[in-house]
Structures are given as C-alpha cells and as structure tokens.
Image: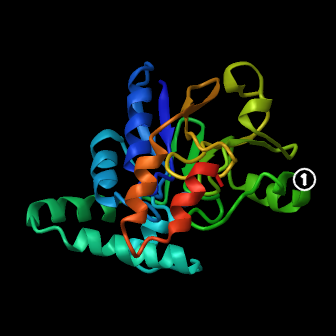
Amino acid sequence: MRTAVISDIHGNLEALKVVLADIDERSVDRIVCLGDVLGYGPDPVACADLVAERCEWCLMGNHDFGVLYEPTNFNLAAEQACYWTRRQFDAEPDEESKTRRLTFLNQLRVRVEFDDFVCVHASPRRPINEYVFPEDALNSPNKMKQIFDWIPKYCLCGHTHVPGVFTDEPEFYPPDEIGDDDRYNFIEGEKAIINVGSVGQPRDLDPRAAYAVMDETGVSFHRVEYNIEETAARIRAVPELNNWLADRLFEGR
Ligand code: ZN
C-alpha cells in the first residue's frame, strides 16, 4: 500500500493543485491529509472541497480548529486570517454546499492509526498544538524521549512546515541528508517520526510545495514548484490577510 501524505495546505489552492497532479503521476493507492487545510491562505473553501474530494481522511490542525471553534495562541496575522476564513464558509449562499463543507470540517479527526503508523497534525502527545522542531533533537532529548514514548513505532505529522525524519537516537534528518532520491528507509528496531512538510507554506527555506509518499519500508519526500506569484497576488487582494503571508511564500520561511 502506497500512501501519499499531504499537510498544512493553508488555503493555498495553487500549491494544492500541483501537488495533487504530481501525486497522480505516481502510483499511489490513496491520499491522506494531516490537517491545517485552512488558515493564512486565500482559497480555504476550494481547498476544503478538494481535500474532501481527494483524500481518504483528514486530520484536525490547529488552524482548522481555530477557524471552526476559536483561535488559541495565534499571532495577530494568523488570528485575523482565521476570522476571515470563517466568514468565507459562512458566506456560502448554497445551503447544500455549506452543509456538506461543515459536515466535512466537523468530522476531522485528531488521530488516525494504520499499520505501524500513528498520524497526528502536531505531535503524538499533544496532537493539535505541540511543535516538534528539528533543533529539539539536539537541544531537548528529554522532550523527544517523552514524545517517542507515545508511539509504538512510527508517527506521521506536519505542523512545523519543516519536512524530515526524527529518529529516537534522537536525531533529525532533513530530506537532503537521508540519501538517494530523498528516500528514508526504516531501520529495524528504530522508531521514527516523519514530518511530511507543508503543501501551502513551506518553512525550510525551500519555497516549493512539499509532500511525502509512504510504504511499509520507508518514506520518499517530494517537492513541486507552483505559481507562488498567483497565490501571493490573491493574498494581497484580501485586506484581512497580512501581506507578510504572501512575502514569506517566496522565501519558504
Ligand atoms: Zn500549519
């Protein structure tokens, strides 16, 4: 079973479309989403519809939670984006579309397990909100040990928008440090937390959209170029979306 894993789309329809097209070129059996479909970006409604249509299931991210319920610990730009996003769903004139979308958003799950994988948006012990940063592998070995205690084997997550593999050494390996073709092969007896990166707002200084493909033996990381200019223009056209949300896309930060 080959599973394409996407995360952190953040209302970036241009990025989502090219990622789905790229996935369609590979032989994958299904697509799943680790959450944060919404927030920051200019096309939250279209992104929600596309994820609902193409993904087998989708998790709840902190921004999805913020839009649906209430934003917590958000900076001003993120909070404003949250309220604006909510209004886009409220503004739908067609009752049937509105109900279908709210049904989709209301059934987003916090945690899904399949085979050897625990899937969460953020971290296995605080699935919606905890950040597991690459530097934690070096600076916070206790935090990493506690987090690894929550999973029997492998975990899939997003949230930081930085793709790579955490092992229980603990160590962090970005995709370009794991060998040929940006593929990481699981090692017998070793636990791993795989961050698949962000489709719509990468923060590893590579502005290309990120996603990953899993199978029983490992994970392949992929990057795809998309029309950043188009997404940025759409962000700048919305007064409630801070221009910085457009600027950062070009730098991948
Ligand atoms: Zn996110």
Answer left or right for 41 relative to 192: left
Residue behind mark 1: 138
Answer left or right for 206 relative to 28: right
**Disc 1 residue type?**
Leu
In depth, the one of 220 and 106 nearer the eye is: 220
Tell me how the rendering is colored. Answer: rainbow
Q: Is residue 241 visible?
A: yes
Q: Residues within 10 Å of mark 1 (few under 14, many from 20)?
A: few
Q: Is the CB atom of the residue marked by disc 1 within 8 angstroms of ligand 1's nearest atom?
A: no
Give the residue at x 65% y 26%: 218
Label 1 secondary element? helix
Above or below for 29 versus 96: above
Q: Position of residue 93 (x, y in %)?
A: 11, 68
Answer left or right for 198 relative to 179: left
Q: Position of residue 71 (x, y in %)?
A: 48, 79
Q: Position of residue 99 (x, y in %)?
A: 17, 65
Above or below for 53 versus 148: above
Give the residue at x 42% y 64%: 236
Q: Position of residue 240 (x, y in %)?
A: 40, 76
Give the residue at x 35% y 59%: 44
Above or below for 40 versus 53: below
Q: Is residue 202 visible?
A: no
In depth, the one of 19 and 129 nearer the eye is: 19
Count of numbered marks = 1
Give the residue at x 60% y 68%: 129
Quadrant (top left, top right, bottom left, bottom right) of the C terminus: bottom right
Ligand 1 image-quadrant field? bottom right
**Quarter where residue 150 is shown:** bottom right
In depth, the one of 146 and 245 nearer the eye is: 245
